[in-house]
Image (spheres, rainbow, N blue to C red):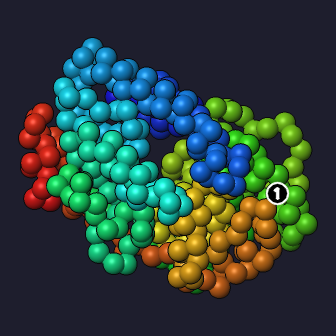
Amino acid sequence: MLASDGRALVLLQQEFPSLPCFELPSYDVQYRSRNMVISIAAQLPKILWAIWREHVLLHKMVEQHSVDAVISDNRYGCFSSKTPCVFITHQLHIPVPKWMSWFVNLVNHLVISRFDACWIPDIATVPNLSGALSHPTPSLLRKKLTHIGALTRMHSLSLQGQVIPPHRVEHPSYLYDAIAVLSGPEPQRTELEKLIVEQAHTLPIKVLLVQGKPEQPTASTESYPENVIVIPSMTAGELNQAILESEVFIGRSGYSTVMDLAHLGKLALLIPTPGQAEQEYLAQQLAAENTVVAQQQHELNLAAGIAAAKESKGLRAIFFDENALKNAVAVLLQGIPGQLAASNTGH
């Protein structure tokens, strides 16, 4: 069974049309200010209200549908005492100003501790993808944590009859100079689209722009430059192939995106959502390692960014551990209320 809200729910319905889907309350987080503290503080009442509502709704779903286990991808209210519940996150340490870090992260750890187990989509050793976001292990959660390795829905598919390994290929034949994949909350998603289209129009490149609008079934009636091909959304398989057919990836520095790019070994220009500290941290960390190029949205320079990305090292697929994920799932399937966390400590 699947449950989510908004565009994420539409995407899940498209990817898994045979599975029942349920709608959860939306957190409806907006990043209108470059100051994340101010932005989130102003929205905290509605976020807490949404978390409480989803908790009540999940409790009813567990009873009505005899749910055997729950896996929550950063949905803080999706836990229940009636069945094993797992929380997936790479953000054990939320990046906030130092003066409020202790309090914010204590609350974060207390809420996560309500779940039977917590899965970290990264490896425990150094180097890793999430850096200070999930390392070191908080003492309050130590017995509940399992590192399951990075996760991705991407695969190394064939490109014009040639198998593309999960790392940089020196001279493949690309269909696009760049693919821009848009995601995240409004109005920043729309703002980034406008900037990319305006700058791409002046460059001698071919760009595939995926708007990240799964709710829009057909292409927009808006006019776009001839060198910018616009598609509302793609299935996982279509997006996978399109990324491999493009020399440089352009998009947000969300953790899911970073994991996908690492698996495919892609060159990337990453633009964190303004005011989203987690994305800003990831972009800065990866740029410091020269694995990607990072630019702020208000300083976007498409030509310079693409050129610099081609000179970067690119991400590598060294953060994945399929056995760790299989072990964690096996423990979950075998678990019963009250025993999941105890069984999980050995993995």
Q: Is residue 18 left or right of residue 275?
A: left
Q: Is residue 155 left or right of residue 210?
A: left
Pick whichever, 264 or 63, lies toward us: 63
- Mark 1 residue type: Leu
Q: Which structural element holds mark 1?
A: helix
Pick whichever, 262 or 35, lies toward us: 35
Q: Residue furthest top?
A: 64
Determine which quarter of the picture holds residue 304: bottom right
Determine which quarter of the picture holds residue 300: bottom right
Residue at (84% x, 36% y) in the render: 221
| Residue 271 in sight from this viewpoint | yes
Residue at (31% x, 45% y) in the render: 110
Q: Is residue 226 left or right of residue 119?
A: right
| Viewport quadrant of the N terminus | top left
Q: Which residue is mark 1?
A: 195
Pick whichever, 248 or 159, lies toward us: 248
Q: Position of residue 107 (x, y in %)?
A: 37, 46
Q: Position of residue 317 (x, y in %)?
A: 41, 72
Pick whichever, 36 or 336, lies toward us: 36
Residue 127 vs 36, above or below: the answer is below
Residue 152 vs 69, above or below: the answer is below
Q: Position of residue 222 (x, y in %)?
A: 86, 40
Residue at (54% x, 61% y) in the render: 97
